[in-house]
Image (cartoon, rainbow, N blue to C red):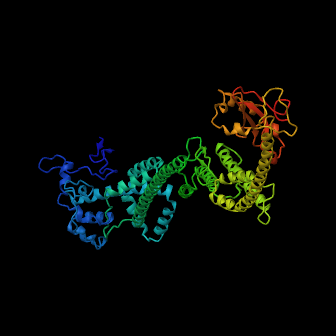
Amino acid sequence: MEKICPNCGFKASEITPVCPNCGFKWAEKEDPSTGAPIGDEQLGRENDDIRWSDYKHVSIGEMEEHFGEAHRDPEEKNKTTSRVTGFQPKDEAVDEDPEDTSVFSHKQTADPVTRETDDEQTAEMLAAHDAEILSAYIRRHKGELEESAEAEDADQVVPADTKDTTAQQLTPPDAEAEIEKQNEAKVQEPTSPIAETQRIDTEETVPQQSVPAVEATNDSNSTKGSPAPKKKSKRIVYLAAAVCLIAAGGGWLYYQQQQTAAQEAQEAKAAQDTVELDQIESALNDMYTSQAHVYLNSDVTADSVEALQEQLDAFKESDRYQDLSAEAAALSDKIAALDEINAYFTDPAVVEDQLNQVSLKEATAVSMSKRAENDDFDTLINQAITMGQSQYQEIQEVQNAVKSMTALIKDGEAPDSVTRSNYNDLVKKVQALPIESEVTTLSEALKTVDTSLTKRETAEKAAAEKAAAEQAAAAEAAQSASNSTAQSSSEEEYILSPNTPTNTNNQPIIPARQSDLADTNNSAWNWGDGVKEKIIATAIARGYVVEGGYTFERVRIVDGEGYYNFYATNAQGSLLKGTGDAALPMYLFTVNAKTGYFRGNGNDHTVR
């Protein structure tokens, strides 16, 4: 008949008194009143008065011995007192399950003799079962522990007859074969260290039945039986091995937890590094005016790029470091180029993608080297360099011209090669320079030239005035002579016509008559409509005179018509080119104020 353990569900044969998995013992007693077998619940209640918390700090072996002795009859207990030494349960209040049906509760039976025999058999089977399972595991994973156990067993001295008797009692042939068969099956099952540790830990949490002492009784002598030293020693080793495995399993779990935590921390750091690197990359990109990464924003400074580079240096191990560092270096290079070229000018010449027409700050050469023009930014920088160099070249040309002109002034006298016109042109160039300090310096240098020119111009003016006075005196004398001649013949009649005689000395062909000159209000002196304007236009058109370079003088009145002599007051007309100032004013022709007819000493009716 098959029996099923109510605790773990183990299926056992009818002859199995104790469950080999959990230690549950099936009832073998009958109720005296009814004759029926005592049930598991009834047996379990026999231990309800036991406070298991009192034994929480007591070893399994001591508890087995204690409960084995506790249910012996007084006479038997006295025989085995020496085996339970110094056992005192600790009185610590720990909540326990009042319905505890552990293995200890099933060791208490009504019949002491039967209970002792059953306990011994059950303990032998459990001990053998546990010992074989642990032994197989340790043989697989901890061979050195077996060697240690065997060395310890070798130190134990046990009489041969006692060992044989104990072995026979602990391991019946049928039970031993069954246990060995189960152990071999379990050993062959592949298990992980953690699973095996958990199994051992689970087995250890179930109190194991101890093997009570076996008493060997004969006719002459009664001797106390004791557990085999080797089995007790091995059990201690197995328990130590189980503790080591549990500790190893816990250590492995702790290692796994540490590895997981480290991996999570590493992943979190990598994610944080990615966020920070993305922020740095975004900040670098924002420094350009566009995604083309050519021109820089006007507010970008070297300090801002340096700050980003310092942040980036914290990620030198990142695979993005080289690219981002190269981008920062490119920005720094462009900022350095901008700072260098813009420092030459009064205002920034290059702003983003624009070249501003600004002037040099100082009259110094632009020594900045041109860039290789890898992009449009380099081209813009080179254009600014060219602009600065051109401005400096213009400044140098003006400086050299000022030096050359001032070098010609000797003892305050300007040579004929230095004219007022040249001076004025150079002054205009100086004033056009963008550098105020340079304008002031060059203007000061030109003062010596202006002083020498003024001195020369004053002398020339005086000479011209003197010559003009002399010329006026000569003209007056000539006029007087002419008037004298005219006065002598003033009474003669002269008609202006093609037949009027001419003079070889270029004097007027009709002399003045004083009586007519005195008649100033005579209407004969009035010009006919448009006559005077026509005469002037003709004289200018023929090159006799220029605008404002002529004069009219009254001569006489003939038949109610007035006559005028026409004179050139300067030699700027093409007809009089090369004429000296002394010949001025020069007579050209005589004209009728009413008709506009005119005639002179030349073939063209003017001057010869």
Question: Position of 230 compared to 486: left or right?
Answer: left
* 543 with respect to 113 (left or right): right
Q: Nearer the viewer, residue 429 or 293?
A: 429
Task: Identify the image quadrant of the C terminus.
Answer: top right
Instruction: Residue at 40% x, 60% y: name it.
Output: 167
Locate residue 401, reporting x and y percent: 76, 55
Q: Is residue 18 above or below residue 565?
A: below
Q: Is residue 156 left or right of residue 556?
A: left
Q: In front here: 587 or 485? A: 485
Expressed as whole percent of the image width and height from the top left, the position of residue 87 reads 27, 71
In the image, is residue 41 above or below residue 238? above
**Residue 1 image point, x, y percent:** 29, 40
Image spot of residue 50 (x, y percent): 20, 61
* Residue 599 showing in the rendered view: yes
Q: Residue furthest left?
A: 33
Figure quadrant of residue 109: bottom left
